[in-house]
Amino acid sequence: MLIINGAYGEGGGQILRTSLALAAILQQPIRLENIRARRKNPGLAAQHLASVRAAALICEASVSGDALGSTSLTFEPQSDPIPGLYEFDVSEARQGGSAGAATLVLQTVLLPLTLAGGPSTVTVKGGTHVPWSPPFHYLRDVFLPTIRPLGFQATLELLAWGWYPAGQGEIRATIPGRDKTDESSKTLSAVAEARGALKHIHGVAVASSLPAHIAQRIRNRAANLLDEARLPHAIEPQRVRSVSPGAGIFLAVEYESGWAGFSALGELGKPSEQVAQEAVEALLAFHHSGARLDEHLADQLILPLALSGQSVTLSMEKISEHTRTNLWVVEQFLGPVAHIDPSQGAIQFTAKCNGQHHV
């Protein structure tokens, strides 16, 4: 059994999610200790408990320690990831409900099910656009297009918007899976090391169960800032319905050989124009950096790139503690797969010569 120290590095929930995904893929029994030790409220919160239960279901794992507030967990997979029809609801993990991130629960099971020997449909209910987690639009418009050439296939639909504090959003993932018996037919594309020229910026400014002028104001400010920067864009203002009101802007940047994403959420007392400015300023800072990966994509690509076994060097907008920690977790399972070079602001992945970990 592999022991993972949840207090390592940034000591957050990503250690848990990456460990669960790799345990399911490799059928590796694990014990997690000191779960979320560096957080204000350590242990399993609702979204983490939902991730544990989701991962356990797809590989028939034996689990102990799966309770709210638990700081240790034993997880023992009994099978390869099993394709099928799944539904997970973050609100069921805690009495009174939860707006815990549906996107983070989905990320826990997404890669294992893309490697399963058949198709799956996964519905996750919870927060779809909430703080401290990737919004639905980032997964759909940035993360999935980036990992598709590596052999990880999925499509996403937003069935309902979910904001803090009620959540109750809904995402559906359609995952074709892969037939592991036909290894010879696999043709994977490499992830390009340079992003190339900017092609287009597209996005949505949203007012959810709020007046429509909020979305329009967010959109107009973002458009004006991008016009000043002379960058091509198309941002759609939308007014939608949801259980809790919410607002935000979600921008995806398409380059010749890559994607990046930026967003900002509204909150009580924050002007609509400030919401737009936060997202656009982050976008412009990344664009002018010339980096291949935005801060969040650098973290999220570690596991799929390590599993694909490709050799590539990718420049990063920022070397975060989150990225360093996630690499450490992956290497507990797979051994050395990459090296972070602070002097170059880059992460260098090394191909596994024996192909043992290739998807």
Image (cartoon, rainbow, N blue to C red):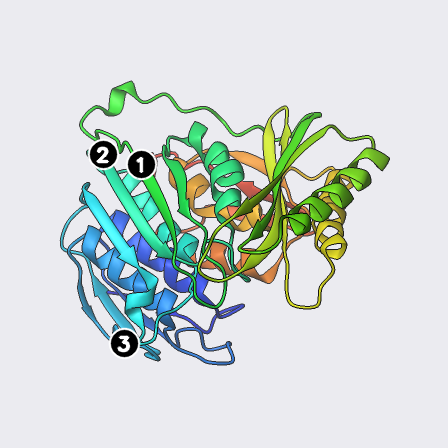
Disc 3 on helix, strand or loop? Answer: loop
* Residue nearer the viewer, 349 or 305: 305
Callout 3: few (<14), some (14-19), or many (20+) C-alpha neighbours within 10 Å? some
Residue 253 vs residue 326: left or right? right
Q: Which mark is residue 106?
A: none
Quadrant of residue 102 within the rendered picture: bottom left
- Residue under the image location 32 percent in, 79 percent down: 70
Q: Percent from the top left, x then y, of residue 82?
A: 18, 44
Among numbered discs 2 and 3, the one appearing first in the sequence: 3
- Give the mark, 1 or 2, whose residue is nearer the N terminus: 2
Locate residue 342, reporting x and y percent.
68, 52
SS state under label 1:
strand
- Tell me the quarter of the image containing the C terminus: top left
- What distance separates the C-alpha of mark 1 from that of mark 2? 8 Å
Residue 138 pos. (x, y %): 53, 44
For the residues labelled 2 and 3, the Cα–Cα distance comes to: 30 Å
Give whichever of discs 3 and 1 has the lower sequence position: 3
Locate residue 187: give its quadrant: top left
Crowding at dot 1, Cα within 10 Å, few <14 / some 14-19 / many 20+, comes out as some
* Residue at the (51%, 46%) spot, across then down: 338
Residue underneath mark 2: 119
Please name the amino acid that badge 2 sits on: Pro
- Tell me the amino acid under the disc marked 3: Ala
The residue that mark 3 highlights is 67
Residue type beneath disc 1: Thr
Q: Which residue is mark 1?
A: 174
Question: Which residue is depicted at the point 14% across and 50% down?
Answer: 79
Above or below, 33 relative to 249: below
Q: Mark 1–mark 2 contact, CB under 8 Å?
A: yes
- The number of callouts visible is 3
